[in-house]
Amino acid sequence: MRKISTLLLFFLCLAGCLPSGWGTPDWGEARTTHNLASKGASRLEFLWVQTVFTTQFSSRQLAATNGKVFLVGSLSQNGPRALVALESENGRESWSVPEAFTVDVAPDMVYVDYRNSVVAYSLKGEEIWRTKPPWARNIGYFSAVDGILYVSAGSGLHLLDAMTGELMDSITEYDPALAMYYWNRPAFVNRYVFKLNHGSVFGAVLAIDRKSGEILWQSADNVISNAAANENLVFLITHEDELQILDASTGKLLEKIPIEPSINFFDEEINPQYEGYSLAVDQTNQILYVLLGDSNQLFAFRIKSGK
């Protein structure tokens, strides 16, 4: 069997698990309409914005690869929860599958959970394989890294071959307290792991060397989203109402793009941990997606410069 990095398993355990049966879709009305202005931004070019509705109980609401962006939610106020595939260039719906709870992608495949099974689809929506991991009562999170799909389900972490769905290994002895960090959604890019060190409300993004586990840099403790990245840049959203762009190797702040109007974090109806402030990067097409849950808006930007 392929040798699995203990450090990688630790990162994936930190990503955690939330049972897929928890919660029902509640497509709330938008509380505001944001203007995420990229005019004058040297590294981003605005492409489109789409109205979307996401569930706060999804462990990963957004993923992107090779000309597609995948959303766990709905495009209509009264629509059922589904995995919705959108075209990267215009935001139009390409295809969908029902009852999805969490999603991740490889360059040519997308993985979703469906009734305690893991299902792999091509980017055209064709089913490739379907697997039900052992003890998969509640699939909470999975992550595709280096040809392996790590599935947090029930009380275990299961390793599947990402191309075939074959079960490679199951790990049941890890600290269950780590499973509560399902919101962190680590990003694996080249030698780095970018993950959110979760605080009570806000957090800091850590850049970690995948081989050594060394923390290379840490952002300010003001982040409300996951971190998304390409080879050179890291993107995050802060409680100062900014989309920030950082240098991936040093953590240096390169650019700040204002989000207007302000997100009201002290509104008792808004919880920044769960309202759906999510980011994803299509590495192939160099497109950044920004999900702002309080306004039900999904923005797409072309990354003009990788440095």
Image (cartoon, rainbow, N blue to C red):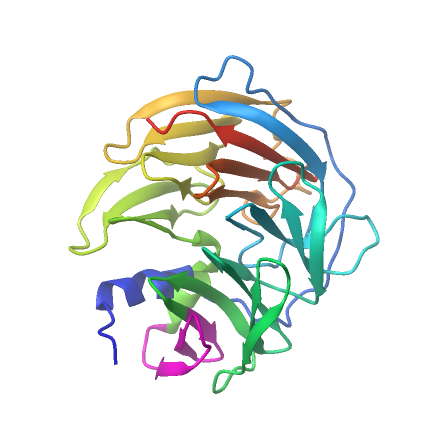
Numbered marks: total: 0
Residue 205 coordinates in the image, percent (x, y): 35, 42
Residue positioned 40% across, 28% down in the render: 245
In the displayed structure, 140 sits above or below 182; it is: below
Residue 87 coordinates in the image, percent (x, y): 64, 44
Q: Quadrant of the C terminus?
A: top left
Residue positioned 53% across, 67% down in the render: 18
What residue occupies the far top of the structure in this picture? 40
Residue positioned 28% across, 48% down in the render: 190
Residue 97 in view in this figure? yes
What residue occupies the far right of the structure in this picture? 78
Residue 23 coordinates in the image, percent (x, y): 68, 65
Q: Quadrant of the N terminus?
A: bottom left
Residue positioned 61% across, 28% down in the render: 47
Left or right of residue 201: residue 76 = right
In the displayed structure, 150 sits above or below 240; it is: below
In the displayed structure, 83 sits above or below 131; it is: above
Q: Residue 81 sits in which quadrant?
A: bottom right
Q: Residue 271 sits in which quadrant?
A: top right
215 within the magenta span: no
What residue occupies the far bottom of the structure in this picture? 134
Q: Nearer the viewer, residue 75 or 265?
A: 75
167 within the magenta span: yes
Residue 222 in view in this figure? no
Q: Residue 185 sits in which quadrant?
A: bottom left
Give the magenta range.
150-175
